[in-house]
Image: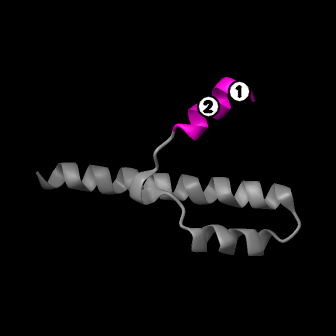
Amino acid sequence: MTEKMFALIDGVDAGRYGATAGEMIAINKRAGEDKFDLMHTAFKFGFLKGQRAEKAKMKKGKAK
């Protein structure tokens, strides 16, 4: 990854779909000392939240 990519990541505003402190602590506890599992689980959790956000966006668009 490049510094440009990290800058893009840092600039993301997840709004209400961002992970809470409690969710991050739960992911960290689940992963234990395994940093790869920590990153992988956090990515999948973020992906899931993104899917939920898109589903809500689509549902809201249909309601209009």
Residue matched to label 2? 7
Left/right placement of residue 43 relative to residue 56 reads right
Residue at coordinates 65% horizontally, 29% vertically from top-left? 5
**The stretch drawn in magenta includes residue 5:** yes
Please tell me whether residue 62 is drawn above or below residue 25 in the rendered image: above
Left/right placement of residue 50 relative to residue 36 reads left
Indicate the quadrant containing the N terminus: top left, top right, bottom left or bottom right.
Answer: top right
Residue range corresponding to the magenta coloring? 1-11
Q: Position of residue 49 (x, y in %)?
A: 49, 58
Predominant secondary structure, magenta span? helix
Amino acid type assigned to the residue bearing label 2 in the image: Ala
- Of residues 26 and 57, the one nearer the viewer is 26
Helix, strand or loop status at disc 2: helix
Residue matched to label 1? 3
Cα gap from disc 2 to disc 1, whole angstroms: 6 Å
Q: Position of residue 32 (x, y in %)?
A: 84, 71
